[in-house]
Image (cartoon, rainbow, N blue to C red):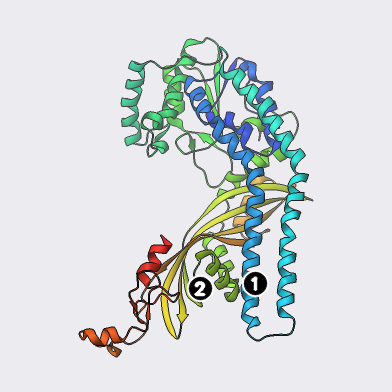
């Protein structure tokens, strides 16, 4: 990118998300972002709306980032427990054959699985130093910078009530006809908060009108289409023409540059801060890749070992499932993106979230109980990009089928819910439903909860009737 940004005689304004980026990324990337903010803080000015949004969201954003250390051991132990239960469950199918020494083998296997817990604890201890460094950075450097600048005279005055009402009235009209900025937030809950971008825009225009010989550089973390022209053919962004014209008409021909955080850093950095830029742009780059999300997840599901799938879902649904007939994959979306440098390549790690519906059956004394399982499948995918491969070159090559292909390497199922289906797998004519005595005689057991009779029509296969079992599962 050619250097176009003009810092001389400019006021730099960051949106809320850009300032909160000092918490969102890896420690190295976050520190680099903060260094750029500190370097140019003399040129900064903060709209009051930005201050309110940063103050409101600061604790939540930084806590989410720090919780990755706290949540990791719990997630790892949970995965180990699922694998242990699945393995022991498979082994129990062979115990009925009374293989020599199989009980001792099961005991040894359980011991091996139990060894994972202290290994996880040891690993977390090794991360303790990194966690402490990250805490020190957040609580000292990041917090101190934001608190200092948000409490300084660089913050604009709060919008008055009368002016706010006028902006809200205008906002209702602008959002109705998709006039930028902010209309993409029109569906947000929270009353007037949906007009946050418009409040910021009005503050920027007002500030530019009041100062002389100053141009504006407005830096946004996100490149939503109510600020930027969407262009699928190139990674670059251009500001919406309507915004540039409005600014020019109100501020007597002063100029404004509306730019993404990654492009801003690209232009102001003296050296090639490539690792940071790749990190900042990872989501935008991935969104421009023609990734067949459904096909990637379907390939994973098709490759699954059916016995392992049945065991896994049985454990997570707390329901003994004997057969899975088919599945339907509904929506698939990218839940998260991370990137890291490995050797001579950048590896994009994608977390895909798909909604899956399985049709299944459980067998009890020769009777099939049909049901279904609804759950989320989390599929992890890797895509490699050459270290010296330019962003545009990588995107174009990938979309033309040249170079790296998505490679799924792991997946898991979450939020597994079992739903009862049709439990009438026998011929209803076997019973005379109009003959009460015949129906009563068809009962072959009693429910352990309500004491009612159990027959083939209401047997949950667990000593209880279907009605009581459903109550247990609520």
Residue shown at 56% from the left, 30% from the top: 58
**In the drawing, does residue 64 fall left or right of residue 326?**
right
Provide residue 349's location: percent of width, then percent of height: 65, 52
Res. 88 mark: 1
**In the drawing, does residue 281 fall left or right of residue 211?**
right
- Where on the picture, by quarter, is residue 436? bottom left
Provide residue 304's location: percent of width, then percent of height: 59, 71
Residue shown at 74% from the left, 34% from the top: 133
Provide residue 360's location: percent of width, then percent of height: 46, 74
Q: Could you say whether the residue bearing mark 1 is in a helix, strand or loop?
A: helix
Q: Could you say whether the residue bearing mark 2 is in a helix, strand or loop?
A: loop
Q: To which residue does mark 2 refer?
A: 320
Q: Is residue 408 visible?
A: no
Alpha-carbon distance for marks 2 and 1? Answer: 14 Å
**In the drawing, does residue 350 fall left or right of residue 467?**
right
Depth check: 118 or 288 in front? 118
Are the two marked residues, 2 and 1, in contact with CB atoms closer than 8 angstroms?
no
Q: Residue furthest left?
A: 434
Depth check: 39 or 28 in front? 28
Depth check: 277 or 57 in front? 57
Depth check: 401 or 109 in front? 109
Res. 179 mark: none
**The N terminus appears in which quarter of the rendering?**
top right
Q: Is tag 2's residue or tag 1's residue first in the polypeptide sequence? A: 1
Provide residue 142's location: percent of width, then percent of height: 65, 27
Residue shown at 67% from the left, 42% from the top: 278
Q: Residue furthest bottom?
A: 430
Q: Residues within 10 Å of mark 1 (few under 14, many from 20)?
A: some
Vertically, is 287 above or below 326?
above
């Amino acid at each position: 990118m050619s250097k176009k940004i003009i810092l001389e005689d400019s006021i730099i304004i960051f949106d809320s998300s850009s300032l909160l980026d000092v918490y969102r990324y890896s420690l190295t990337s976050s520190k680099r972002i903060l260094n750029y903010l500190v370097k140019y803080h003399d040129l900064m000015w903060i709209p009051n709306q930005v201050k309110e949004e940063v103050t409101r969201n600061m604790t939540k954003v930084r806590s989410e980032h720090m919780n990755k250390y706290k949540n990791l051991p719990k997630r790892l132990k949970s995965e180990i427990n699922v694998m242990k239960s699945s393995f022991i469950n498979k082994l129990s199918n062979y115990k009925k054959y009374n293989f020599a020494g199989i009980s001792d083998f099961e005991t040894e296997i359980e011991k091996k699985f139990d060894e994972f817990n202290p290994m996880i604890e040891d690993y977390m201890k090794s991360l303790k130093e990194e966690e402490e460094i990250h805490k020190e950075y957040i609580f000292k450097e990041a917090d101190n910078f934001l608190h200092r600048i948000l409490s300084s005279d660089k913050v604009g005055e709060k919008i008055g009530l009368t002016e706010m009402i006028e902006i809200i009235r205008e906002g209702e009209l602008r959002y109705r006809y998709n006039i930028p900025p902010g209309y993409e937030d029109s569906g947000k809950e929270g009353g007037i908060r949906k007009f946050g971008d418009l409040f910021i825009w009005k503050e920027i225009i007002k500030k530019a009108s009041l100062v002389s010989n100053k141009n504006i550089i407005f830096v946004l973390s996100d490149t939503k289409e109510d600020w930027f022209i969407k262009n699928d053919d190139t990674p670059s962004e251009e500001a919406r023409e309507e915004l540039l014209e409005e600014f020019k008409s109100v501020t007597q021909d002063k100029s404004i540059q509306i730019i993404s955080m990654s492009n801003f850093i690209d232009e102001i950095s003296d050296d090639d801060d490539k690792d940071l830029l790749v990190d900042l742009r990872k989501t935008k780059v991935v969104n421009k890749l023609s990734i067949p999300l459904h096909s990637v997840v379907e390939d994973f599901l098709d490759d699954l070992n059916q016995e392992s799938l049945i065991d896994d879902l049985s454990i997570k649904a707390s329901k003994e499932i004997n057969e899975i007939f088919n599945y339907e994959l509904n929506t698939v979306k990218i839940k998260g993106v991370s990137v890291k440098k490995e050797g001579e390549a950048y590896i994009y790690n994608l977390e895909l979230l798909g909604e899956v519906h399985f049709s299944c059956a459980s067998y009890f004394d020769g009777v099939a109980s049909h049901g279904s399982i609804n759950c989320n499948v989390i599929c992890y995918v890797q895509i490699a990009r050459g270290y010296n491969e330019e962003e545009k070159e990588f995107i174009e090559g990938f979309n033309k089928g040249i170079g790296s292909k998505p490679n799924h390497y792991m997946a898991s199922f979450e939020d597994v819910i079992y739903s009862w289906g049709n439990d009438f797998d026998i011929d209803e004519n076997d019973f005379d439903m109009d003959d009460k005595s015949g129906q009563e005689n068809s009962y072959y057991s009693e429910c352990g909860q309500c004491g009612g009779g159990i027959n083939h029509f209401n047997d949950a296969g667990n000593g209880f009737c279907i009605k009581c079992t459903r109550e247990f599962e609520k």
